[in-house]
Image (spheres, rainbow, N blue to C red):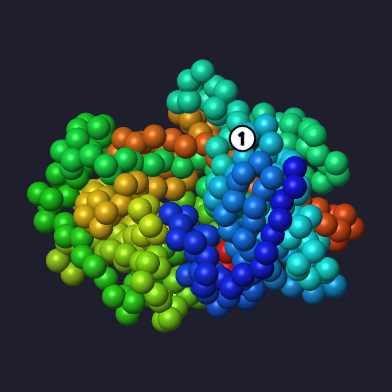
Amino acid sequence: MKIDVCPKNIHTLHPSDILFQTSYWGKVKARLGWKPVAFDFHASTGQRGDVMLLIRSLGSGFSIAYVPQGPEWGPVPEQYGLFLESLSQEIGNHIDSKVAFIRYDLPWLSPYAAEATDGRSWIGHPPRQLRELRMNIGTRTWNLRKASLDLTVADTLIIDLDQPEADILAAMKPKTRYNIRLSQRKEVRVLNASVEELPVFYCLYGETARRNGFPAGSYRHFAALFSTRDLHPGDPRIIFLLAKRGQEILAGAIVAISGRRALYLFGASANEGRNLMGSYALHWEAIKKARAMGCSAYDMGSVSPADDPGHPFYGMYRFKTGFGGTIVHRNGSWDYLLDRDGYQAFRNYETSVNIRLSLWNTG
């Protein structure tokens, strides 16, 4: 497979439903220490489009490149590896030679989920070694490696908004509908928040991180979402919502609108007042707002791939599947090696130090 690439300005990226492949996201990440670069590409098989990479120097003579949920358009599953090999080699001719590897956080559907007889009973991917074998079949270099973690979302719940509100409600589980109505009876209000209230949200986020045992991102990562001033028509929009009863803040959410897709980026809830169902009220309000803004899908983010109580995302699965929707299984994050020694040094660093999420997310 042959792919031709041509460098371009990130401000000329094509409009996309994928937030992470927009010039807006490139500007956000530039504030966090990354250098965004973009390319048009044209494959001999007919696929064409553009892609944005984020590049960052780690010192010690090497850098890393990251493609967040891209490329948006790709080949059939049997040619995933061939496509990424050719694209990576061409991009490698246009970027700093110190870049040790390119990490692709692929938005493409997992070939294993497509082959499952029942998507809802699918329990996840086979072992890493088998995935790498399949990805590299037919390639010349066998340089594709499964990353140690998926940087955005490999399994996500998506709600179809191209239907009446009544039908969206009817597709929810009875308990979810009850909790939405309970929040209304308890006089919970969901309001548009201003950036001045971001510190309040971040406090809630800290409570949520401690309660659920996940590492909290830095405040500057959240602030960067609101600090990009040179927006253009068609750029993504950020919706910042807080659920309140009286002066009590119960929960918050940050939702991005890119093209016709709404993406639930971050959420938080207080330890107190959880019986008021503020989080249910938040998502229902976000769904209604996204639908009113012309979105066709509401992406609720991470869930376990199936009804598996042993999975770390099972709690999110139970909560989010209550809203109906469909679980989409993506192919996750993959690395293409440009410098084997530099890549091995990075993998040792990434796996031995608990900095993985902060490295990729907060700069």
- From what the image shows, is residue 327 above or below residue 276? above
Residue 145 picture quarter: top right
Would residue 25 appear left or right of 186 to someone viewing this image?
Answer: right
Q: What residue is at 70 percent from the left and 70 percent from the top?
A: 56
Q: Position of residue 139 (x, y in %)?
A: 81, 39
Q: Name the residue under label 1.
A: 76
Quick one: 48 or 263, which is closer to the camera? 48
Quick one: 184 or 8, which is closer to the camera? 8
Q: What residue is at 34 percent from the left and 46 percent from the top?
A: 297
Q: Where is residue 310 in the image (x, y as percent from the top left)?
A: 53, 32
Q: Position of residue 20 (x, y in %)?
A: 51, 60
Residue that extends furthest to the right in the rendered view of this protein: 341
Q: Can residue 54 be seen in this view?
A: no
Q: Position of residue 134 (x, y in %)?
A: 74, 31
Q: What residue is at 64 percent from the left and 56 percent from the top?
A: 41
- From what the image shows, is residue 219 above or below residue 275? below
Quadrant showing the C terminus: bottom right
Quadrant showing the N terminus: top right
Q: Few, some or many C-alpha atoms within 10 Å of disc 1 (few <14, some 14-19, many ≥20)?
A: few
Would residue 277 appear left or right of 106 to someone viewing this image?
Answer: left
Residue 177 picture quarter: top left
Q: What residue type is labelled 1?
A: Val
Quick one: 352 or 339, which is closer to the camera? 339
